[in-house]
Amino acid sequence: MQTGASFCTDCGNRVGAAPESSTSETVSSASDPNSTAENGQTKNNLSTLSLTFGILSIFFFEFVFIPIAAVVISSLSLSKANQLSRNGVSKSGKGVSIAGLVLGVIYSLLGFYYLLLW
């Protein structure tokens, strides 16, 4: 190492700087699905629930309350996804929420049509 150099010639680290965290810690925390975002928000669990209700509405559309529940949960999930996106979270669940909303709307309309025919 040279005198007055700001980086070590052997390892490349900054001289006099605090040691940085290892890359294994960074990778494990980034891949942890339950880790919190920088702003304290967690992932959007409502998006998974909205898609689940959307898929259930395919099979149970004659019970109109299931597709309506998919629409309501998807609306709440989209609101949370937009909030997470504004805070810089990259995986906010917006696409999954939209899929649940589309399924809920389609099968609620189909359910109402089914009820009108009976």
Image: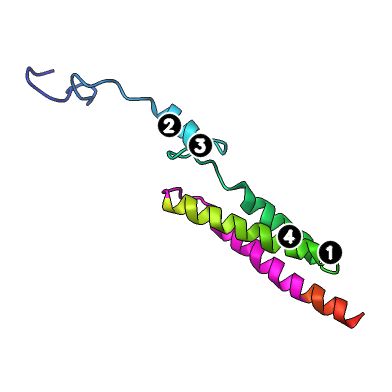
Q: Amino acid at mark 2?
A: Thr
Tell me which residue sits at (48%, 50%) in the image.
84
Tell me which residue sits at (78%, 75%) in the image.
110
Q: Amino acid at mark 4?
A: Ala
Does 43 sit left or right of 57 as displayed?
Answer: left
Q: Amino acid at mark 1?
A: Phe
Mark 3–mark 4 distance (CA, rounded to whole Å): 27 Å
Which span of residues is magenta-colored? 87-109
> Where does residue 53 sit, x and y in percent of width and height?
73, 57
User: Between tags 2 and 1, which lies in front?
Assistant: 1
Q: Amino acid at mark 3?
A: Thr
User: Between tags 4 and 1, which lies in front?
Assistant: 4
The single residue placed furthest to the right in the displayed view is 118
Tell me which residue sits at (69%, 67%) in the image.
103
Query: Which numbered disc flags the more N-terminal residue, 4 or 1?
Result: 1
Mark 4–mark 1 distance (CA, rounded to whole Å): 12 Å
Mark linked to residue 60: 1
Q: Which residue is mark 4?
A: 69
> Where does residue 44 sit, x and y in percent of width and height?
58, 48
Mark 2–mark 3 distance (CA, rounded to whole Å): 13 Å
Task: Reply above or below: 44 against 68.
Answer: above
Q: Count the labels in the image.
A: 4
Element type at marker 1?
A: loop
The single residue placed furthest to the left in the displayed view is 4
Q: Which residue is mark 2?
A: 26
Q: Which residue is mark 3?
A: 36
Does 80 sit left or right of 104 as displayed?
Answer: left
